[in-house]
Image: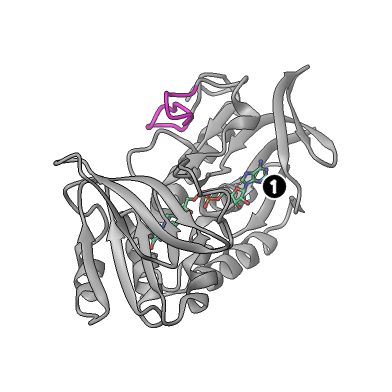
């Protein structure tokens, strides 16, 4: 029986692992992969203590820091499918095995949200893409639309500008949600065609490959098409809360509701942190801090002290 089982090897999970090791908690960390969502980011400028770092290097550092901890067992490449109550604690079931613990720290983050329009699935990998770091070079000389104007959308546009002939950003909003600094850099590129505000994507067009985008101007109701050969979808994330949906209380977005002072969930002994929670801001530094807090709360709980 472990003192705690940590779900996830992103910033939150690794922070939890390091803090659990410092408190000499008997710990198991289970993750599909180390690094978390920003692994696709070419440059991260706000990871405190480091001027700039790539997502891949951040992932390597996180894994190295985690593996340097004594007393933490690691299952890398396992997927948690269910967490349930058991005698004296909790049972964490993965696609490989099951494990028991007195507390659980849920840090398994979020994944990509889909547009759910006609053509999205059909042209996935044939013009529709979700990872600009991975796929931008394939769009050399092509016209490409990025759907979404948060930081992920802006970063996708930045990745594409050195390769694509034309880059557009589409948003359903009337303003950009990502960092103004990044937008200012994008606007300097001669092949950036601008932001198309107040749009609702209706369909992704094509034959064997993507050939265009059908969208509606939500202000005028007018439907328009734009000829593009690539569409990068960057419209946010969905919490990976399926495995714990029957255990803890979730909000309407499927995020785990936590006490933001302590990281406690609706179930005593279960704590959560990072992008899987109803935290207002989804950022690595915040995930790390909140996971530290949640782990200290789990430690208090194991000591029989109230949080
Ligand atoms: C493209 C991009 C760029 C970003 N840039 C920045 C930035 O510059 N600065 C910043 O502060 N933030 C940035 N963010 C946000 C930041 O990445 C997240 O806020 C942060 O990664 C959240 O950490 P987390 O540990 O909560 O979750 P995640 O990073 O989502 O990590 C979740 C972990 O859980 C694992 N996992 C998921 N489901 C399971 C399961 N069922 N079983 C086992 N393991 C599982 C995953 O493999 C992963 O290791 C960016 C995000 C994206 C998408």
Residue drawn at point x = 48 percent, y = 74 percent: 136
Q: Quadrant of residue 62?
A: bottom right
The residue indicated by pointer 1 is 29
Quick one: 262 or 13, which is closer to the camera? 13
Question: Camera-side residue: 121 or 130?
Answer: 121
Provide the major secondary structure of the magenta segment: loop
Residue 59 pos. (x, y %): 57, 65
Label 1's element? strand
Q: Nearer the viewer, residue 195 or 96?
A: 195
Q: Position of residue 157 (x, y in %)?
A: 35, 68
Instruction: Point out the residue furthest to the top here.
Output: 87
Image quarter for residue 166?
A: bottom left
| Residue plotted at (20% across, 73% down) | 187
The answer to whether residue 262 is above or below residue 35 is above
Observer able to see residue 127: no
Can residue 84 be seen by looking at this rendering?
A: yes
User: Does 267 sit above or below residue 50?
Assistant: above
Q: Considering depth in this image, is 281 or 105 the residue closer to the camera?
A: 281
Residue drawn at point x = 36 percent, y = 61 percent: 146
Q: Is residue 215 left or right of residue 79?
A: left
Q: How is the image coloured?
A: one colour
Residue 236: x %, y % from top left = 41, 47
Task: Name the spot of residue 163 as percent of width and height, x first.
Answer: 41, 81
Magenta span has 201?
no
Residue interval drawn in magenta: 250-263
Does the magenta segment cover residue 262? yes
* Left or right, 128 with reference to 223: right
Label 1 Cα neighbours within 10 Å, binned few <14 / some 14-19 / many ≥20: many
Q: Residue furthest front?
A: 207
Position of 127 with respect to 44 (left or right) is: right
Count of numbered tags: 1
């Amino acid at each position: 029986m472990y003192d705690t089982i940590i779900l996830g090897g992103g910033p939150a999970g690794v922070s939890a692992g390091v803090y659990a090791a410092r408190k000499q908690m008997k710990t198991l960390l289970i993750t599909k992969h180390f690094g978390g969502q920003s692994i696709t980011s070419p440059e991260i400028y706000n990871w405190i203590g480091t001027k700039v770092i790539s997502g891949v290097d951040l992932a390597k550092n996180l894994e190295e820091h985690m593996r340097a901890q004594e007393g933490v067992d690691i299952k890398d490449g396992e997927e948690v499918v269910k967490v349930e109550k058991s005698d004296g604690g909790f049972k964490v079931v993965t696609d490989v095995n099951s494990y028991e613990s007195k507390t659980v720290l849920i840090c398994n983050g979020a994944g990509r949200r889909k547009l759910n329009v006609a053509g999205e699935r059909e042209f996935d990998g044939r013009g529709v893409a979700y990872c600009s770091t991975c796929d931008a070079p394939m769009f050399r000389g092509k016209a490409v639309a990025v759907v979404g104007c948060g930081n992920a959308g802006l970063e996708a546009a930045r990745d594409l500008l050195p390769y694509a002939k034309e880059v557009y950003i589409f948003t359903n909003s009337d303003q950009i949600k990502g960092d103004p600094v990044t937008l200012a850099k994008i606007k300097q590129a001669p092949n950036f065609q601008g932001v198309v505000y107040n749009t609702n994507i209706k369909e992704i067009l094509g034959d064997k490959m993507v050939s265009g985008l059908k969208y509606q101007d939500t202000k005028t109701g007018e439907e328009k098409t734009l000829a593009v050969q690539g569409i990068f979808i960057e419209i946010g994330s969905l919490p990976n809360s399926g495995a714990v949906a029957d255990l803890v209380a979730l909000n309407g977005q499927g995020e785990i509701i936590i006490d933001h002072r302590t990281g406690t969930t609706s179930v005593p002994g279960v704590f959560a942190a990072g992008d899987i929670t109803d935290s207002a801001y989804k950022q690595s530094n915040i995930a790390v801090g909140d996971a530290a807090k949640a782990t200290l709360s789990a430690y208090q709980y194991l000591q029989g002290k109230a949080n």
